[in-house]
Amino acid sequence: MAEVERQHGLRVAICPVADRARYRTQLADSEVLWHLLDPVSDAVLEAAPALRLVQKIGVGVNTIDLESARRRGVAVCNMPGTNTQAVAEMTLLLILAALRRVARLDAATRAGEGWRLPAEVQDRYGEVRGRTVGLVGYGAVPGRLAPMLAAMGARVLFASRSPKPDAAGERRPLDALLRESDVVSLHLPLTAETKRLIDAAAIARMKPGAALVNTARGALVDEAALAEALARGHLGAAGLDVFEAEPVPADSPLLDLDNVVVTPHVAWLTQETMERSLAVAAENCRRLGANEPLLHRVV
């Protein structure tokens, strides 16, 4: 961060999420807020009278009160593309981990039971090749992921609002994609329309033994319905980087299931993503100071 300050002439204050008092103090005279996941509510914006820009480090802006920002004359920008490679790779990792039951294998090996797993567990290990992978949404991440899956021998389906002529896959309505896919991977923004899109009824339409992977937003999924389907065996596995409540509660039933592999909303987080992201954030600070059009302005 010191290098960013030196190169771009910025004064950057870093605040741990848990230090709310320090956060409020720093907000009081901040002109720009570089935002990760902690919600930027109307109250946050009110506490920052000098604020001119909320710069999302990432793509999704569902954690920012856009209407309040608009009303207060605060610009909001995101940075599409900076984390595409990282999220595509993590999605592939979770697909592989779900198919190979890595969570159970890891726990069993650590407990000295890895060489004594029952045959019914070993019989469920699977490969990507020959399987159908359904991508719900077809933006930048699925566009990067689909050719990887196709190169590995998967049949790729996708559901999207509009045709994608250059897509590496076959377009399907969501219901057909759920019925046909061995793995369903979610790649949608969280909106009123998509909240709990994958509910009990949608899960019931998925193939028995299918896997669900989510590196988008946790609230796309009805977590209680997902846990129930995994526990009774209708779904075979899940790979989850995101949850409806974050940090995920310790008593979440999903954490008790050995056919679920979980990560703490870090699909986007690599050294390379941060370098690309800070470059965009610093450039928008320069543009703000120079009264030039901002990159990727949402509000």
Image (tube, rainbow, N blue to C red):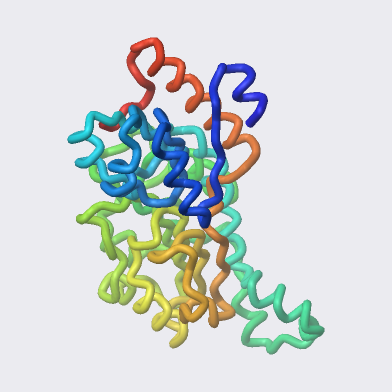
Q: Nearer the viewer, residue 263 or 75?
A: 75
Q: Nearer the viewer, residue 254 or 89?
A: 254
Give coordinates of residue 47: x percent, y percent: 33, 43
Give coordinates of residue 210: x percent, y percent: 45, 71
Q: Is residue 236 above or below residue 8?
A: below
Which residue does the image show at 46% across and 60% down from the upper left? 242
Give coordinates of residue 87: x percent, y percent: 52, 46
Q: Quadrant of the N terminus?
A: top right
- 139 vs 116, left or right, is left
Give coordinates of residue 239: x percent, y percent: 52, 65
Which residue does the image show at 62% across and 17% down from the upper left? 7
Q: Is residue 265 above or below residue 113?
A: above
Q: Is residue 296 above or below residue 57?
A: above
Q: Nearer the viewer, residue 185 or 106?
A: 106
Q: Is residue 98 above or below residue 257?
A: above
Q: Quadrant of the C terminus?
A: top left
